């Protein structure tokens, strides 16, 4: 049975954490830069790229969770179908044959 929440590897957790930290730093930097700063456009583009990467990561995780949920639903449906099947009637005691 698949886990409800598959564990992320330490590297994936670190990547996400670093990405969020970079976004926060870039946001602070962009708000402090003057509008006419020569590097501002490059910083805004980098910020947009980081947000796109974060969105892609979130979409991948959502897809993985959907796959796990679908697998669990299929297992539940199969167990419910197995439970709903009628049990065969007990055979009872063996019959004796009478000969005359």
Image (tube, grey):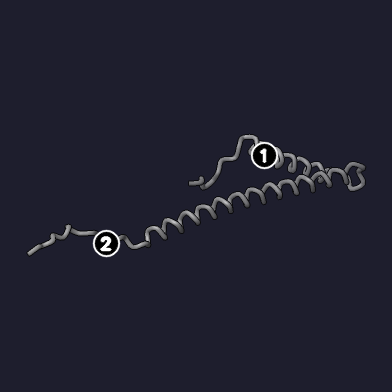
For image coordinates 79% across by 46% down, the residue present is 49
* Cβ–Cβ under 8 Å for marks 1 and 2: no
Residue drawn at x 42%, y 60% as measured from the top left: 81
Q: Is residue 40 left or right of residue 72?
A: right
**Residue 94 appears in which quarter of the rendering?**
bottom left
Residue closest to the eye, 82 or 89 = 89
In the image, residue 66 sits, relative to residue 33, either above or below, namely: below
Nearest to the observer: residue 98 or residue 51: 98
Q: Residue at x 63, y 48 (%)?
A: 61
Mark earlier in primary sequence (1, 2): 1
The location of residue 59, given as percent across then percent down, is 67, 51
Residue under numbered circle 1: 17
* Residue at horizontal 65 percent and vertical 38 percent from the top: 12
Residue 6 point in image, percent of width and height: 55, 43
Q: Nearer the viewer, mark 1 or mark 2?
A: 2
Q: Which residue is the site of mark 2?
A: 89
Q: CA distance from mark 1 to mark 2?
A: 60 Å
Say what secondary structure mark 2 lies in. Answer: loop
Q: Residue furthest front?
A: 100
Secondary element at tag 1: helix
Report the front residue among 31 and 58: 58
Bin the neighbour count of mark 1 within 10 Å (Cα to Cα): few under 14, some 14-19, many 20 and up.
few
Q: Is residue 7 left or right of residue 36?
A: left
């Amino acid at each position: 049975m698949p886990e409800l929440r598959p564990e992320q590897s330490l590297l994936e957790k670190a990547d996400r954490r670093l990405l969020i930290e970079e976004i926060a730093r870039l946001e602070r930097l962009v708000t402090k830069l003057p509008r006419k700063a020569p590097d501002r456009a490059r910083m805004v583009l980098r910020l947009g790229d980081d947000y796109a990467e974060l969105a892609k990561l979130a979409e991948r995780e959502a897809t993985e969770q959907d796959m796990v949920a679908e697998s669990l639903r299929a297992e539940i449906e199969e167990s419910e179908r197995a439970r709903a099947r009628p049990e065969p009637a007990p055979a009872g005691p063996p019959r004796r044959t009478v000969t005359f």
